Every structure is written in C-alpha cells, then in structure tokens.
Image (cartoon, rainbow, N blue to C red):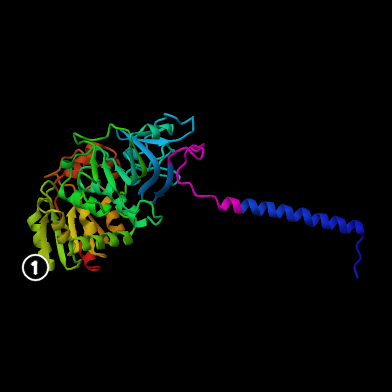
Amino acid sequence: MLQISRKSFLFLFLFFIVSTLIYLTISTNYIYEIKQPFQSLDLPNISHATSNTIETKIIECREFADLTSYCLYENVCFKDNDFIFLTTNKTLENVNFEFNGQLSQWDHYYVQDTNGKIMRKNPNNPLPFRSFISGKYSNPLIWKESKIHHEGCHSFLAFDFHGHNIFHWSIKVSPLFLFKHYNKNNVCLTFKSIRLISRSPNDLNDWQRNFLEISSDLKIDETNYEFTNKANSNRYKLQCYKHVLVPGTSIYLFTGPKEAIDFREKVSRRYGIVYERRKVIIIKRKNRLIVNQNEFEEFIREKFGNESVECIFLEELNFQQQVEKISKAKLLIGVHGAGLTNGIFVPTLGTIIEITAPHFHYPLYERIAVQSGHIFFRFVTQYDPKIHADTYAKINSIDCLSQANCMLYWKNAALKVDISNFSVILDQALEVL
C-alpha cells in the first residue's frame, strides 16, 4: 500500500483547499456576470437617487434589426414638447439630448460600415432612434414644481418633415401596435392619452385617423388626444407623467409576418372584412403617369379575364374602402409610392409587383411586402428619351439616391411599361399565385 509522509499529506491538503477556493471565486464571478441585466442604451450613469427621490426610469427599450424601436419610461416631465429626463447625476443636469435621427443614417439608403450598428456613434440620448423629440436632463425637483401630474400610460409622437403621407405616418404610428403586441409586463396595457407633436386635428386624413385608432386602441377625440398645433394646446405648461411610451420608427411597419397577420385580423374584426385572394388589383396614380396605361391594362385583362381585374384610384376611396379592395387581391400591381403601403392589407401570401423608374432602387415597399408575409417582384422601367430628360440617364441608383434632385426626378417621372419585358415578370408571378 502506498505510504505518504505527514508533510506530503499536509501539502496535498493545502493544495486542494486553495484550488477549491480559486474555483469557487471564478465560478461566482462568472455567474454574477451572466445574470447582469441587459442594457439596450449606452448612457452615462444616471442614477444616484435616494429612496425618496423621483427619477426617470427606462422600463423597457426594444430595438429590432429593421430599426423599429420604442422605449417605455416612468416618471417623465414635458414642457413645450421637450422631454425632461429626471436625474440626480450632476454632470448631466441641464444637458440637452444629442440628435439621433438623420436621414443619412437609414440603413437602406447609404452604404456605410458601422460594424453592425445603426449609427457611427452612440449619442447621449435616452430616446429611441428617430423619435424626433428634443429634450434634456434635469434635477428631479422639477417633478414637485409641476402643477399638472398625469397617472396611467401616455404616448408622445413626433414626426420629421416627411410625416404627412400615409407611409411616413404609418412608420411612426405602427410602433404603438408593436408595443401593445409585445407588452407582457402589465405596464401600459392601455393608453390614456396620446400627444401628436406639431400636428393639428385637421392634418389627419381619414386613412391616418383609422390607422392610428387601430394601432393604439384609442379613439380620437379631444379627451384622448392632444394636438400641439391646436390653439389651446397645453404644450407650454410643465406637465409630468407616470408612464410615457416614445416610439422611434418602424420603417417596414412590422418586424415579421406574424405581426402583420395579427394586424390584419384586428382590422378584420373592426370592419368585418374577409380576406380573399381572388382578384388582380391595379393601383392607378393621378400624379405618377404610366404613359401607355391603356395598353398596360388591356394586357393584364387579357391575361386574367376582365372580371378578375380591377383598377382603382386610392385618392377616391376612404380607409375602409381601400382596405376592402386590397383585401381581395391575389395580385397587387402599382407604381412606387405611398399607396403601396396598403400592401399590408393584401391577404397572406399574396403577390405584389412594384413598377419603378430606372435608376431608382428604393426597397421600402419590397421590405414592407416581405415583412407582411407576401411575395414581391419589382419591374424596373427603362429610360425613354421621348419622355425623360437626359440629365440623370446614366447615373446608378446609389448615386441617384444621394442626390435630392435626381431622386425627386425619377420618383415623380412618367413611366412607360414595356409590355414584352413586363410579361416576363408576370409569368414569374403567375407561378406563385
């Protein structure tokens, strides 16, 4: 039998004790690290509060891969549409938020190497990307100075200068639906009010009003909504809120087909709409002309039969009528423009063909279609010296989209559809109808 000396035994025993202590120390640190909460915003340390201090808390921030974002806050004040973030951090007191939403930072416009990030730097801004709300950090004493305090959950929406057509409207409003869709923490289950910054009641058309009510579950009236461009707006008064949701943008409206399907079901319940893939719907535009429109329509009718094809002007229909028409489409065809936002109402696995100008690869409606659970094709028309100036005839899409005049020219240009070329795209679409 192996014999060990007393000295050797003590040495081995001490070695075992030391090794065990080292192992436990490393394991404890590892477990501590993996249990730390995930922080979605890179902000300075803003919490030095005592238990009696009312500070702003970021309850939740969601940042999806497609730039959709929103944040939910507790204990927030507003004055003149400025978001006031309450903190006892003296280094931040009265510091204005850095801007975090330039157009050049949208991912599908410009080629950028940002190491997978939306922006090249992390701004000192606790609001979501492209919220378009200005603000500053302030001492929590502001809370006590306010004469107006609001309990419950509220939301504030601000828009860039494009926010008037239905596409730009919907990318700001749809985060309200996404928040309610994913909110499982029993905070802000319903909104008590929504403030629309730089908007008046007359700015909203029928489509926008309906889309907002569907997304928020809040009826538009003077009690539920505040329009800061209205004459008697309270925007200049200091007001504080228990919970505030701030949407960023949802550039493709949904982050996946499941959300789009749930949204369509919500619309169906509200209006009694039944989705059926049975018609070919052609969206006609009064301000974006297909010069051979009659020839184009005749070709489509020959392919599908006259009874199966319907041409519509969306401008002549209210929201419900637009949805009724689009909800029966197995194939939706339209020239690039905000009207294709209605593609979200095509029945699931419907097909969309977008007709675009040359040198205008602008994938907004492609991504909306895919995120909505549809099949997408793009038909690019050709330069025609009879209807197009030669100023931008030889530019590529990337360069054109970085030049405002070029982008606007091709965006609004008249188009001619080569029927022979279009038939190739249509034959591909027929295989999935």
At which x and y percent is residue 335?
18, 52
Name the residue nearer the viewer: 81 or 389.
81
The segment highlighted magenta reads: 31-56
51 over 339 or under it: above or below:
above
How many neighbours does mark 1 have within 10 angstroms: few (below 14), some (14-19), or many (20 or more)?
A: few
Residue in the picture at 91% in, 70% down:
1
18 over 3 or under it: above or below:
above
On the question of residue 266 being in view, the answer is yes
Question: In the rendered image, which quarter contains the C terminus?
Answer: bottom left
At which x and y percent is residue 324?
15, 61
Residue in the picture at 86% in, 55% down:
11
Name the residue nearer the viewer: 184 or 18.
184
Q: Does residue 344 belong to the magenta stretch? A: no
Query: In the image, what residue type sits under mark 1?
Result: Glu
Residue in the picture at 18% in, 47% down:
383
Q: Does residue 33 belong to the magenta stretch? A: yes
At which x and y percent is residue 272?
18, 64
| Magenta-colored segment: predominant secondary structure | loop
Horizontal side of 355 relative to 186 (left or right) equals left
Residue in the picture at 49% in, 30% down:
90
Question: Regarding mark 1 in the picture, which secondary structure is present there?
Answer: helix
Write down the quadrant of residue 310 in the picture.
bottom left
Residue at which label 1 appears: 307
At which x and y percent is residue 158?
28, 40
